[in-house]
Amino acid sequence: MATDPPPRSSWNLVVGDPVGPGRTVMRRSGGGDRYEVYVAWDEVRLSPVVMKRVRPDFSEDASTLRGLTRDVEIMAAFDHPYIVRVLDHDATGPHPHITLNR
């Protein structure tokens, strides 16, 4: 008999919630065990951005934060108009995240 996986921690952000300076949630886009993904409106760029945010239970987990930093380093190595680029990231604050845009 299969058992349900344990519930994932969440920031429980909904449409209109602030998700960073000048950014508000447009919708939740998905996620995995350690991350949540949101589409947010960026007031400076006047465009949507994607925010990959570490789940609350993992916001101080060294392995998760190294993975977030590794993702930033890999994406920074590519410079092509059809590949997303990192706008900003924070692996040390209370809400570790990567913000992406095309």
Image (spheres, rainbow, N blue to C red):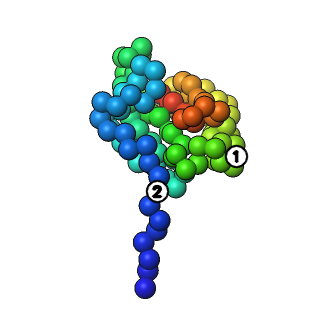
Residue 82 location, x and y as percent? Answer: 49, 30
Say which amino acid is labelled 1. Answer: Ala
Residue 90, position as x, y percentages in the image: 60, 30
Residue 78 visible in this rendered orientation of the protein: no
Quadrant of res 29: top left
Q: Which mark is residue 62?
A: 1
Q: Which mark is residue 74?
A: none
Which residue is under mark 2? Answer: 8
Where residue 35 sits in the image (x, y, percent)? 51, 47
Crowding near the residue tagged with mark 1, few <14, some 14–19, many ≥20 C-alpha atoms within 10 Å:
few
Q: What residue do we see at 43% from left, 43% from top?
A: 11
Please give the name of the residue rendered at 44% of the width and 77% of the height, measured from the top-left corner.
Answer: 3
Most extreme residue toward the left, as rendered? 15
Q: Residue lying furthest bottom in this view?
A: 1
Please tell me whether mark 1 sits on a helix, a strand or a loop: helix
The image quadrant that residue 98 belongs to is top right
Q: Say if 74 sits above or below 35 in the image.
A: above
**How far is disc 1 from disc 2 in space, using C-alphas?**
18 Å
> Residue at image x 29%, y 35%?
15
